[in-house]
């Protein structure tokens, strides 16, 4: 199977499992909703019944917003103009690449979200690998079986990403590399180009690690592996043997992600006003989140499709389909 055909097959597999997309959207909404309610409470407490509250319903009051930001702490510091529309995407990307620290409540919510994804990852990949419905009992059985395996994998992932962000990132963008390369420069454009090149290098390192860990999850699920170190070694071996195909497929998946982000950049709502305008902006934002989640699922499904095509055949999974056992009452009914 070629990378384009693997991507097309992945789109088909994901579209045949709308319940999974809906489920991960509900999880995303469920994790973010308490944070949104927390921000709402802080805003309500600060505005009260003042004239500024009435003005906030009709337009954005940047003077009040600046006042709120200056006195905010914890979750409140995230309520900035950069959260409006496409600015939120750029703010998250900048914070990620620049290794910016976030408030502890945001870190806690992100950690909970990652753990939830870790739990459901096994069931999701298994569903895409089998390319047929596994029902709720089969899905959750596989998710539970791989949760603790993926927890062990997460330890390795944490170590690798900690090295990248705590050692490699400061080395590249500190005095060791960036500072030395730009120390005697007088042209700002050249310094900017060097900075972009270093970001691309760091992004490439992140992509390689992400690729290896993705295929480690795929190999663990498809081949029912229990050793996560073995799954990582097997993933590296598969990528080495199929380097061109794996790289091209990852590029196509990433291009799909860029297209989704680009479309959102054109349709992302601005500050707007209250009432219907706010609900329309919310709906557009949720559609973007759905599209982002769909792309993430396509990543896993395409990597699964490529691996299965190079390993054995489509829908090959080593473990048998989990079957819910009959209850004692069912046996009593069928017993003569």
Image: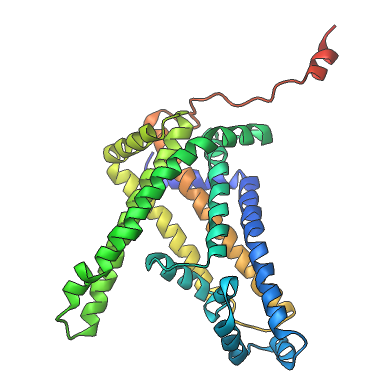
Q: Nearer the viewer, residue 43 or 32?
A: 43
Residue 188 is drawn in which quadrant?
Answer: bottom left
Q: Can residue 305 be seen in this snapshot?
A: no
- Residue at the spot 52% in from the left edge and 72% down from the top edge: 88
* Residue 85 locus on image (x, y percent): 56, 75
Horizontal side of residue 286 vs 101, given as left or right? right
Outermost left residue = 184
Determine whether 23 is above or below 173 in the image: above
- Residue at the spot 58% in from the left edge and 58% down from the top edge: 109
Determine whether 142 is above or below 51 in the image: above
- Name the image quarter holding the N terminus: top left
- Residue at the spot 56% in from the left edge and 42% down from the top edge: 119
Residue 235 is drawn in which quadrant?
Answer: top left
- Name the image quarter holding the C terminus: top right
* Residue 297 locus on image (x, y percent): 52, 49
Horizontal side of residue 20 vs 48, given as left or right? left
Determine whether 208 is above or below 166 in the image: above
Horizontal side of residue 87 vs 57, given as left or right? left
* Residue 48 locus on image (x, y percent): 75, 84
* Residue 153 locus on image (x, y percent): 43, 40
Residue 81 is drawn in which quadrant?
Answer: bottom right
């Amino acid at each position: 199977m070629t990378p384009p055909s693997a991507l097309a097959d992945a789109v088909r597999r994901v579209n045949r499992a709308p319940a999974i997309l809906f489920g991960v959207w509900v999880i995303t909404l469920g994790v973010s909703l308490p944070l949104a309610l927390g921000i709402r409470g802080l805003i309500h407490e600060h505005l009260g019944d003042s004239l500024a509250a009435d003005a906030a319903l009709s337009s954005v009051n940047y003077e009040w917003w600046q006042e709120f930001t200056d006195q905010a702490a914890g979750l409140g510091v995230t309520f900035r103009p950069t959260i409006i529309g496409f600015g939120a995407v750029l703010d998250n990307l900048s914070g990620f690449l620049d290794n910016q620290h976030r408030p502890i409540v945001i870190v806690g919510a992100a950690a909970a979200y990652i753990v939830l994804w870790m739990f459901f990852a096994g069931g999701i990949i298994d569903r895409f690998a089998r390319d047929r419905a596994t029902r709720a009992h089969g899905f959750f059985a596989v998710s539970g079986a791989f949760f603790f395996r993926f927890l062990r994998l997460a330890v390795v992932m944490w170590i690798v990403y900690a090295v990248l962000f705590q050692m490699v990132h400061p080395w590249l963008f500190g005095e060791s590399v960036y500072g030395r390369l730009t120390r005697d420069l007088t042209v700002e454009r050249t310094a900017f180009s060097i900075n972009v090149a270093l970001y691309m290098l760091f992004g490439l390192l992140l992509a390689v690690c992400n690729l290896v860990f993705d295929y480690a999850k795929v190999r663990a699920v498809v081949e029912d592996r229990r050793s996560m170190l073995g799954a990582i070694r097997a993933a590296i071996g598969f990528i080495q043997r199929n380097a061109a195909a794996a790289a091209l497929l990852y590029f196509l998946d990433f291009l799909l992600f860029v297209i989704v982000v680009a479309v959102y950049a054109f349709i992302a709502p601005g500050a707007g006003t209250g009432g219907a305008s706010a609900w329309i902006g919310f709906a557009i934002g949720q559609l973007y989140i759905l599209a982002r989640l769909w792309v993430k699922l396509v990543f896993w499904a395409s990597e699964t499709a490529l691996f299965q095509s190079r390993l054995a055949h489509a829908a090959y999974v080593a473990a048998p389909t989990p079957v819910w056992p009959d209850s004692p009452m069912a046996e009593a009914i069928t017993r003569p």
